[in-house]
Amino acid sequence: MKAYYAILLITTVVLTGCTEVLPRQRGALALPQMALTPDPLEFGFRQHTAFSKEAAGGGYGGGGGGCGCN
């Protein structure tokens, strides 16, 4: 019976942490520290260095519509 109450308590605690976040609230809740690339300028420099060393580029969007006129 103690296991039942433990599971019930854990379920209650977990479900009370769930809430709906409106799209207009997401900007206020997003912290800059949580960004995948906190410094966009440094990220650009690192990508440029990687492309120069590998003699390859792309993979992050850009060019071409499939018509062969790139």
Image: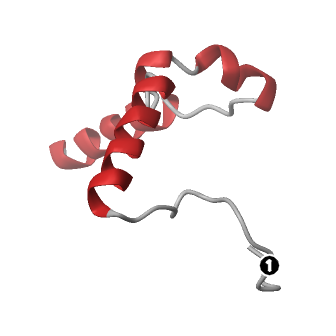
Residue 10 seen in the figure: yes
Residue 41 image position (x, y, % from top left): 48, 24
User: Residue 67 or 25: which is nearer the viewer?
Assistant: 67
In the rendered image, the residue lying farthest to the bottom is 67
Q: Please give the residue where the numbered disc 1 appears in the rendered image.
A: 69
Q: Residue at x 33, y 34 (%)?
A: 9
68 vs 14: above or below: below
Secondary structure at badge 1 equals loop
Residue 12 image position (x, y, % from top left): 43, 35
User: Residue 31 or 4: which is nearer the viewer?
Assistant: 31
3 vs 35: above or below: below
Q: Which quadrant is the C terminus positioned in?
A: bottom right
Q: Residue at x 51, y 17 (%)?
A: 31
Residue 46 image position (x, y, % from top left): 35, 38
Residue 36 seen in the figure: no
Q: Report whether 64 appears left or right of 59.
A: right
Q: Report whether 18 appears left or right of 63.
A: left
User: In the picture, residue 7 is in which quadrant?
Assistant: top left
User: Residue 57 or 40: which is nearer the viewer?
Assistant: 57
In the rendered image, the residue lying farthest to the left is 2
Amino acid at pointer 1: Cys
